[in-house]
Amino acid sequence: MKKKIPYIKILPLLIISFICYKIIDNPKALLKGLKYLFSMLLPFIWAFGIAYFLNPLMRYFENKWKWKRYLSLIVV
């Protein structure tokens, strides 16, 4: 027989409310965590931006002069 736990449906609500309480209670810790997360993601954001802007130049070299992808990547 499966034993039913009566409070299992309330547990996610309690966890979410505890997290919201901690965020409201100490917003500096949340901002510090978001700043840390953003500083970790910033190099990837820059890399995606640079790749986005250089991709048309690479396609130009590939299509116009029929270069291979690695050669156009080296030139760009």
Image (cartoon, helix red, strand yellow):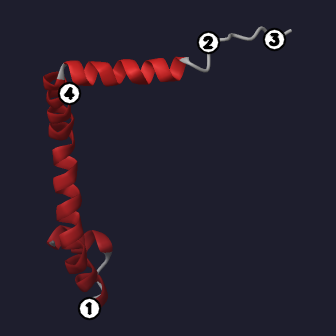
Q: Nearer the viewer, mark 4 or mark 1?
A: 4
Q: Residues within 10 Å of mark 2 (few under 14, many from 20)?
A: few
Distance from disc 2 to disc 4, alpha carbons, whole Å, reads: 29 Å
Residue depicted at 18% across the width and 19% down the height? 26
Distance from disc 3 to disc 2, alpha carbons, whole Å, reads: 15 Å
Residue 7: numbered disc: 2
The residue type indicated by label 3 comes to Lys
The residue type indicated by label 2 comes to Tyr
Callout 2 touching callout 4 (CB < 8 Å): no
Query: How far across and how far down the image is residue 25, in percent?
Result: 21, 18
Callout 1 touching callout 2 (CB < 8 Å): no
- Whichever of callouts 1 and 2 sits on the residue coming sooner in the sequence is 2
Q: Which residue is mark 1?
A: 64
Q: Is residue 61 above or below residue 16?
A: below
SS label for mark 1? helix
Q: Nearer the viewer, mark 2 or mark 4?
A: 2
Q: Which residue is mark 4?
A: 30
- Whichever of callouts 4 and 1 sits on the residue coming sooner in the sequence is 4
Residue 2: numbered disc: 3
Distance from disc 4 to disc 1, alpha carbons, whole Å, reads: 51 Å
- Whichever of callouts 3 and 2 sits on the residue coming sooner in the sequence is 3
Q: Nearer the viewer, mark 1 or mark 2?
A: 2
Residue depicted at 20% across the width and 34% down the height? 34
